[in-house]
Amino acid sequence: DVKVTQSSRYLVKRTGEKVFLECVQDMDHENMFWYRQDPGLGLRLIYFSYDVKMKEKGDIPEGYSVSREKKERFSLILESASTNQTSMYLCASSTGQGREQYFGPGTRLTVT
Amino acid sequence: QKEVEQNSGPLSVPEGAIASLNCTYSDRVSQSFFWYRQYSGKSPELIMSIYSNGDKEDGRFTAQLNKASQYVSLLIRDSQPSDSATYLCAVREAGANNLFFGTGTRLTVIP
């Protein structure tokens, strides 16, 4: 079974803090993705990566950056957290052919 | 802007009935189609994928794809209360690595 893990299930941070969310997959998938999910807005793609050190902006990259130094690990960084970044953050991975994506359990981030 | 449209619901069906969930998409070059189930507070879980026109069955689930009409549907037979969840439709266009998701349909199965 594909396993995608995320570093925290719940996280509370203060405005202005730098926040790191980590995601690890164990299936040697080429592609990894970061989404945020908000009520009524569905899943919105923040960034994705199709190879080590490669990244592409998604629909809402502003205020975020990513890092992929190893194939199995994809990190999302909030450079200076703001209250409008309070959300559920979901990591996913897929094979190079871009077929089905498998999601991690999610991190519910609250910025106060 | 690619669009994936779903009726947000809620859709309520009695236990044992067939639940029918629909999804339409705007991009004619969309190639792969997926249905995810998401329980409240949990992450999406893949339940079906379909790549060619017609029906694909897996247990109580049947996915139906009609590329000419640009819709994909999910039928759940013998609905159970444990099927109560939000169902997300996702599509991938040819050559792309990312998926486009609908906002989901909330299904409630009434015992």
Image (cartoon, grey):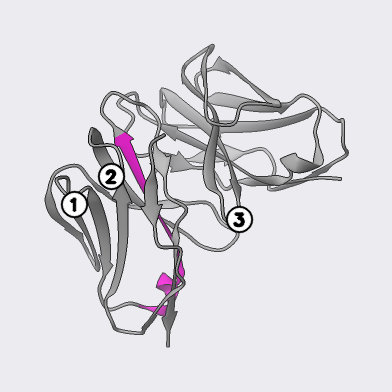
Which residue position holds label 1? B65
Mark 1 chain: B
Residue name at image x 50 percent, y 14 percent: A52
Q: Residue furthest left?
A: B54
Which residue position holds label 2? B33
Q: Is residue B36 above or below residue A1?
A: below
In the picture, measured across the screen, residue B88 lies left or right of residue A25, that is left
Q: Which residue lies furthest to the top in this view?
A: A53
Is residue B81 shown in magenta?
yes
Residue A5 is situated, as x and y percent measured from the top left of the image, at 57, 39
Chain part drawn in magenta = B80-92
Q: What residue type is labelled 1?
A: Leu
Mark 3 chain: A
Q: Is residue B103 above or below residue A4?
A: below
Mark 2 chain: B
Tell me if I can see residue A20 in this picture.
yes
**For the residue carrying disc 1, how many other residues have a C-alpha within 10 Å: few (<14), some (14-19), or many (20+)?**
many
Q: Nearer the viewer, residue B108 or B11?
A: B11
- Say which of marks 2 and 3 sits in front: 3
Q: Residue B50 carries which label?
A: none
Helix, strand or loop for disc 1: strand
Is residue B43 shown in magenta?
no
CA gap between label 2 and label 1 equals 8 Å
**For the residue carrying disc 3, how many other residues have a C-alpha within 10 Å: few (<14), some (14-19), or many (20+)?**
few
Labels 2 and 1 touching (C-beta < 8 A): yes
CA gap between label 2 and label 3 equals 23 Å
Q: Main secondary structure of the magenta part?
A: strand
Q: What residue type is labelled 3?
A: Pro
In the picture, measured across the screen, residue B72 lies left or right of residue A57, that is left
CA gap between label 3 and label 1 equals 27 Å
Which residue position holds label 3? A39
